[in-house]
Image (cartoon, coloured by chain):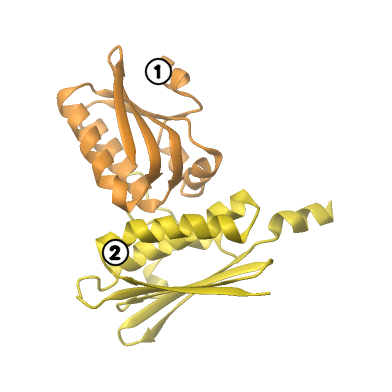
Amino acid sequence: MEIQKRKEGDVTILSLDGRLDLTSASSLKEASKDILENDSKKMVLNLDGVDFINSSGLGALVSILKEVRNSQGSMRLSNLAPYVKEIFDITQLTNIFDIFSDEKQALSSY
Amino acid sequence: MKESLKLIFPAKWESLQIAEDLFSTISKNITTDSRTAYHVRTVLSEGFSNAYLYGNSNLPEAIIIVEMCFNSKTFTANIINDGRGFADNDIKWNEFPSGDNESGRGLKIIKQLCDKLEYKRISEDKFGIFIEIKLQKEEEKQKLI
């Protein structure tokens, strides 16, 4: 999975491309940890390029959310593909994450 | 006409990416319904990841077997790994972990997406999950309208 980072004001945006599973989970957690330690406490994860997520990927996002909250930060998810969103619905994680249909709305929520 | 496929992987980290690539390709080729294809891919991915994480992957000769069989109506798969597996009362099938838990969702996702899920200890050191997904759900729904 590819991860691209950029900033919009005081919000760091990570754009993800590929599948979010056991093989890519650790690199995403590392990237997020680096942002929290060195960059900003506000994050948007744009999943527009994520064509597949499994429970390992979900676990990585949960782990990141915990780190964000422990750092008194905040995190948004945006641009979930319909079948990716379905997995969030099934696992009831739509109740846990702040999910927006597009990046602009996610940024505006800050 | 039935198609079948048997894949045998070493239970090693390197197998994960190969398996995921194969599941992606296979799922797109067994049905034209994209949502069902996604479900098939997800179920295979979750079953394989579970076998890797919780099977005896530390054994040097450990393997994960994925046997698939499908026709126009039904997809079935057996995912078999070395290890003792789990018992039914180990899993609260209707409860998903809270937002604090990083794990514990994989098997429940399989249960939600499959039409049939069975699991059993095959031998003292081999365990398998058996899944079935109907491929013609959307067409059947259309016929009923």
Q: Which mark is residue B53?
A: 2
Residue reaching furthest bottom?
B123
Camera-side residue of B10 and B91: B10
Q: Colour of chain A?
A: orange
Quarter of the rendering containing residue B61? bottom left
Q: Which mark is residue B50?
A: none
Residue that appears at 52% across and 60% down: B26
Residue B22 image point, x, y percent? 44, 60
How dense is the environment of label 1, judged by Cα within 10 Å: few (below 14), some, or many (20 and up)? some
Instruction: Give the amino acid type for the residue marked by disc 2 in the picture.
Output: Leu
Q: CA distance from mark 1 to mark 2?
A: 36 Å
Residue that appears at 51% across and 49% down: A90
Among the chains, which one is yellow? B
Same subunit, labels 1 and 2: the answer reads no
Q: What secondary structure is found at the residue carrying circle 2?
A: helix
Quarter of the rendering containing residue A103? top left
Residue that appears at 27% across and 60% down: B14
Is B92 positioned to the left or the right of A4 in the image?
right
Residue A64 image point, x, y percent? 27, 38
Please indicate, yes or no, whether residue B46 appears anywhere in the rendered image: yes
Instruction: Give the amino acid type for the residue marked by disc 1 in the picture.
Output: Leu
